[in-house]
Amino acid sequence: MPPSTATCSTTSTCGPTSVGKASARSFSTKSGRHSPEGLVLHVFQQNIGARAFYERHGFTVLDTSDGSRNMENLPDMTLRWTPSSAR
């Protein structure tokens, strides 16, 4: 089964006050439970902290963009997480 690419009605973000807190880890854990086949998300390339977090949690880069596909016009990356049981 392919990873979830469903559009969500809400956006989940972690601001500077959340860095190193359990909220980001909780997001990762809950995402795995709700999308056991995997998931795809976007992160801004300049967000080094988020990129490092996702890399530590097994996300891999699918592609990069110059920012033309997002409202902020900032370069971004598409990341994918697939649990080892679905690989």
Image: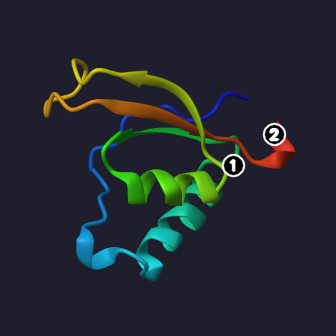
Q: Residues within 10 Å of mark 1 (few under 14, many from 20)?
A: some
Q: Is residue 10 left or right of residue 30?
A: left
Location of residue 54 with respect to 78 vertically, above or below: below
Location of residue 65 with respect to 85 vertically, above or below: above
Coloration of the structure image: rainbow
Q: Position of residue 57 (x, y in %)?
A: 63, 58
- Cβ–Cβ under 8 Å for marks 1 and 2: yes
Residue 72 figure quarter: top left
Q: Tell me the kind of residue under disc 2.
A: Ala
Q: Residue at x 56, y 35 (%)?
A: 4
Q: Is residue 31 left or right of residue 46?
A: right
Q: Position of residue 40 (x, y in %)?
A: 52, 36
Q: Residue at x 55, y 62 (%)?
A: 28
Q: Quadrant of the N terminus?
A: top right
Task: Looking at the image, tell me whether mark 1 or mark 2 is earlier in sequence order.
Answer: 1
Q: Residue at x 46, y 50 (%)?
A: 51
Q: Quadrant of the C terminus?
A: top right
Residue 86's disc number? 2
Residue 79's disc number? none
Q: Nearer the viewer, residue 33 or 26?
A: 26
- Which residue does the numbered mark 1 point to in the structure image? 36
Q: Is residue 6 visible?
A: no
